[in-house]
Each structure stands twice: as C-alpha cells, then as structure tokens.
Image: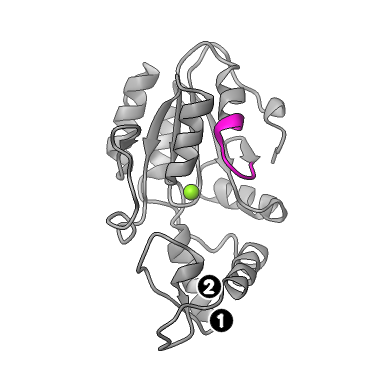
C-alpha cells in the first residue's frame, strides 16, 4: 500500500514489469456495470468510454456526465472490491514474478487505496501498488530508471501508452483489453504499441522482451 514510487523496492538485478489494474488485471467495466444495475441504471457497452455508456432504463440519451462521475466515485467508495480478476492474470503474474520485479500502477482514486490493495491480495496478486493520477509516463520512467534490465508496461489506454513512449521510449509497451466486449471498441495504435488481449499470450511476449523464462 504505497503511493510514493521511490518507496517501492526494485531489485536492480531483475527486469521490471509495470502493470495497470482496470481492464488489465481486473474486469472493471463488468464490475462497474453490476454496481450501476444495483443503482437502477443500465451500463451499455456501446463505445470505449465510461460516462457516455450509463443510461437510465430504456433512455436513448446517456446520463449527464456529472451524475456519471458521482456514480464512478461511489463505485470506488462502496464497491471497489466487487470486481472480477481478468482470466489468467494472476497465474501469468505469478510466473513472471519468478524472474522479474512486478509493480502495479493504477489510477484508482486515492481513497480506494486500501480496498484495491485488499482486492489484489485476495486474488493472488500481492505486488507493490502505486496509485497514480493522470498520464503514466513520468511514473513509469522513474521506475524503469531503477533497474538496468529491461522494463515492460501494460495498459489498456492508448494515452497512457503514448505517454510512456514519450517519457521512457526504451520501455516495451503492450496494450491489453481484458473484457472481450470492449476489444472491438478499444482503439489501438499497432504501429506504436503491441496489442495482446489474452493473458497466456501476453505472458509469453512479456517474458520474451524481459529476457526471462516464459513459464
Ligand atoms: Mg486501465
């Protein structure tokens, strides 16, 4: 349960994997949709967006963005642990951790820190966690500088991957979208970042760039 990147222990003899939570280790949209249903709203997976996908039952126009943001805040306050892990994520991290440092880098709200840490532990992903805010390039560059070995970064959002490319171009970047419903909707930038949406395949590709055994 750490926020300060410098407080995270990184073994400089090992490569580093930095990994996002929502839509990478966790099926966020799925859990958020369940929460919204409990509040009497519909979550429609119409586009790769958050607030524009929330509707009153049967409505044609999505809910106003402010109400959507309030529901998002409430989800992280009251239901942050009620999300399912992405299939294969914990297994893959367990294998990769045999050869690499692993750091979880999430943009969850700070008030959800303990809930998120408990969730990671409960699902077999007890790795150091950093709460980030905004683009991830700076945090990734700082972490990658702490080992001379290769670093890999996994996120579902192109703007985070772009920001890492700009701040730390040597870091190997992978886009992963864990929820099959979102995959066809999620924009990719294949000329800039590799895209692998299944954990077993991603595990092999990450092991390869980090120079460690695949399993
Ligand atoms: Mg994410």
The one nearer the camera, 166 or 128, is 166
Under 8 Å from ligand 1: the CB of mark 1? no
Report the magenta residues as a range: 132-139
Under 8 Å from ligand 1: the CB of mark 2? no
Percent x, y for residue 22? 49, 51
Q: Is residue 39 above or below residue 170?
A: below
The one nearer the camera, 35 or 81, is 35
Dot 1 alpha-carbon crowd within 10 angstroms: few under 14, some 14 to 19, many 20 or more: few
- Residue 35 is tagged as 2
Q: Main secondary structure of the magenta part?
A: loop
The one nearer the camera, 126 or 7, is 7
Q: Is residue 51 magenta?
A: no
66 sits to left or right of 212: right
Q: CA distance from mark 1 to mark 2?
A: 7 Å
Q: Which secondary structure lies at badge 1? A: loop
Percent x, y for residue 86? 40, 51
Q: Which residue is mark 1?
A: 39
Q: Which secondary structure lies at badge 2? A: helix
């Amino acid at each position: 349960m750490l926020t300060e990147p410098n407080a995270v222990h990184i073994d400089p003899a090992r490569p580093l994997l930095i990994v996002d939570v929502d839509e990478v280790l966790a099926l966020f949209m799925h859990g958020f949709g369940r929460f919204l249903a409990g509040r009497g709203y519909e979550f429609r997976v119409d586009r790769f967006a958050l607030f524009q996908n929330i509707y009153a039952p049967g409505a044609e126009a999505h809910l106003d963005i402010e109400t959507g943001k309030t529901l998002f805040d409430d989800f992280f306050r009251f239901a942050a642990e009620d999300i399912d892990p992405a299939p294969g994520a914990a297994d893959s991290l367990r294998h990769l951790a045999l050869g690499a440092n692993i750091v979880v880098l999430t943009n969850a709200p700070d008030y959800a820190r303990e809930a998120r840490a408990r969730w990671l532990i409960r699902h077999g992903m007890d790795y150091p966690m950093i709460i980030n805010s905004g683009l991830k390039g700076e945090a990734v560059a700082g972490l990658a500088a702490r080992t001379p070995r290769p670093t890999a970064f996994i996120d579902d959002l192109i703007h985070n991957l772009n920001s890492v490319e700009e701040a730390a171009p040597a870091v190997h970047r992978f886009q992963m979208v864990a929820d099959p419903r979102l995959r066809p909707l999620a924009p990719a930038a294949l000329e800039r970042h590799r895209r692998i949406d299944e954990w077993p395949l991603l595990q092999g590709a990450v092991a390869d760039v980090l120079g460690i055994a695949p399993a």
